[in-house]
Amino acid sequence: MAVVVSGRRQGASPALARRSAAHVTQMRLDGAHAHRRLADWGPRIETITSQIVSGGYTVLARARDLAVNNGYAAQGIEVFASDLIGDGIKPSFLGDDEDLRKKKAAAYAEWVDEADADGHLDFYGQQDLVAREVFEAGECFVRLRPRLLSDGLSVPLQLQVLQSEMLPLRLNRRLESGNEIKAGIEVNGIGRPVAYHFLKSHPGDHHVQGSTELDTVRVPAEFICHVFRKRSAGQMRGLTHLAPAMVPMFVLDRYDDAELERKRTASLFGGFIKSPAGEAGSPLEQRADDGDLSEDYGPTGDISLEPGVLHRLLDGEDIVFSEPADVGTNYEAFQYRSLLRISSALGLPYWAVTGDLRETSYASMRAGMLQYRRQMSRLQHGVIAYQLCRRVVRMFMDQAVLSGRLIIPGYAQTWREHVRASYIPPRWEWVDPEKDINALKAAIDARITSRRKVVEATGYDVEEIDAEIAEDEARLRGNSSRQNDGGKDA
């Protein structure tokens, strides 16, 4: 048996050693080979921002088209927004002063209905719109717009939702100040965004004259919430969630259209008239030349096919009906696998995108939902809460104090304490309510979680729940007391 010493095998022949050395020098990662199977796979190393800038407009336009015309894409957006936002991600203000917390919550609840600069939605409706844009376009911009006291708002602040197209991707240049504009975002020397250069009108709005990339408005970064999922370090613009599923969705849609057309054609029962072989012209053609045709034939001798009608052919003629090939038994299996691939690329459960529950069971759905909820939780807290809600609450508190809606002495020095809040995402419905509730009760009793955490997981504020429970108990005591008094009077 040969022994390896310092990279050489003792007792091995020189020829074998040379072959081994040659083999070592030729070893490469399988993914680095350029043989036949990988000959046409030659991607370049580029930052994701460079890829978005070069192909972003085309990808975005195709994503918008799929969202309107492809049923699976449209359903995916609905599922994503409803699961991510639901009826809204709400703040629960923190702090030791219970009375001040209640005042903050009351002021915020009043302002929510006034938040939309367009006047169409409340703030939670705007969150839903932002989620839809993040899925469809990959990003969304929310402009924080302080208002005048004369506007009559409870807190002088409103929000304006701006689509991705409003920030031109190809606006890239260095400024005299030393800052640089990258994909419409102005950054300073350390790469931190300091301003956003928005177009004055949407480039796809045909009702107004489109603006050019030079016709922009500079908005300081403190008034912009850039909401997007950051997929890699250094990424500056968002990429649609439809990107990895875009090609299979488009091709599958065309395949379905072809199969539908095949079925439509087969239902027409088209046929071909066979004339006797060897004749210069069929009897039908001869009678068409003589103008001697019955009403069953068209002016050119074609037979019109209608349901339930039998036509009399001329002597010597025969008719053969076309029989287009059926879709076959593999169609449904192919559809299932294709839609599994698409759902996986979208990051959504197959049954949620397609509505097909035939392949699911209680165990499989529960396991799948646990993983899906982790993904949603990551986006709820890392994207919506951090990039949007946190910034909105900070601006809301500033404007509420400046306008006198909230009186907080020393706010300028202690603002960090007063903007602290936990953000409560929408509740998830229990798959098995009895088992889930008993498990949560056991977790609270075992002191491995708090009642606040459990209540917030249901989408509610624990203080609101406690206040409502106290009101219910007081009302029950009052009803019981009145009944007892009535019994004594009787």
Image: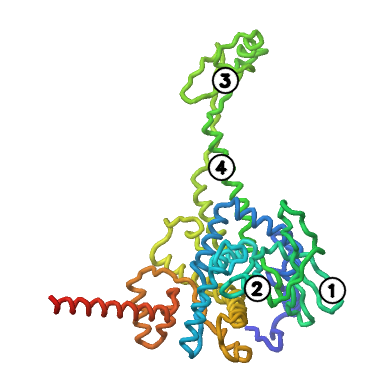
Mark nearer the N terminus (4 vs 3): 4
Which disc is residue 259 wearing? 4
Mark nearer the N terminus (4 vs 1): 1
Alpha carbon separation for disc pair 1 and 2: 35 Å
Say how many tags the image has.
4
Alpha carbon separation for disc pair 2 and 4: 59 Å
Which disc is residue 245 wearing? none
Task: Assign a secondary structure to mark 1.
Answer: strand
Residue 366 locus on image (x, y percent): 42, 68
User: What residue is pinned by disc 1?
Assistant: 174
Q: Nearer the viewer, mark 4 or mark 1?
A: 1
Q: Is residue 140 above or below residue 21?
A: above
Residue type highlighted by circle 1: Arg
Q: Nearer the viewer, mark 2 or mark 4?
A: 2
Residue 282 locus on image (x, y percent): 63, 14
Which disc is residue 303 wearing? 3
